[in-house]
Amino acid sequence: MAQDTREIEVTAKDLPLHCPTKEVALWASHPRVFLDIADSGNAMCPYCGTKYRLKAGEVLQHH
């Protein structure tokens, strides 16, 4: 079964980052998993394969 891999650009205000995001319908979601994007600027969900990328120029603040 082929799956389209989504790539989502996030900003510092989207942190802490988790998948699925609030935009995903509840019936189509998987368990929430928090993703660490701080070190590399990229993260991939281990459940659905969605790729997240930190928007260029974003400054991360410590929470």
Image (cartoon, helix red, strand yellow):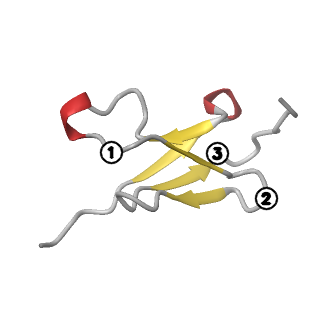
Quick one: 50 or 8, which is closer to the camera? 50
The amino acid type of the residue labelled 1 equals His
The numbered disc on residue 2 is: none
Residue 28 screen position, x and y as percent: 21, 40
Residue at the spot of label 2: 39
Tell me, yes or no, whether the two marked residues, 1 and 2, touch with CB atoms within 8 Å.
no
Task: Look at the numbered disc 3 and give the secondary structure of its residue.
Answer: loop
Residue at the spot of label 3: 55
Q: Work out how far the residue at label 3 is from the one at label 1, CA to CA, in angstroms.
A: 25 Å
Tell me, yes or no, whether the two marked residues, 3 and 1, touch with CB atoms within 8 Å.
no
Could you say which quadrant of the image residue 43 lies in?
bottom right
Question: Given the current orientation, which residue lies at the most extreme bottom position?
Answer: 1
Could you say which quadrant of the image residue 23 lies in?
top left
Of pointers 3 and 1, the one earlier in the residue sequence: 1
Of pointers 3 and 2, the one earlier in the residue sequence: 2
Q: Residues within 10 Å of mark 2 (few under 14, many from 20)?
A: few
Q: Work out how far the residue at label 1 is from the one at label 2, CA to CA, in angstroms.
A: 25 Å
Q: Residues within 10 Å of mark 1 (few under 14, many from 20)?
A: few
Q: Is residue 5 left or right of residue 13?
A: left
Of pointers 1 and 2, the one earlier in the residue sequence: 1
Residue at 66% across, 33% down: 15
Residue at 83% across, 29% down: 63
Residue at the spot of label 1: 30
| Vertical comparison of 40 with 20: above or below | below
Q: Nearer the viewer, mark 1 or mark 2?
A: 1
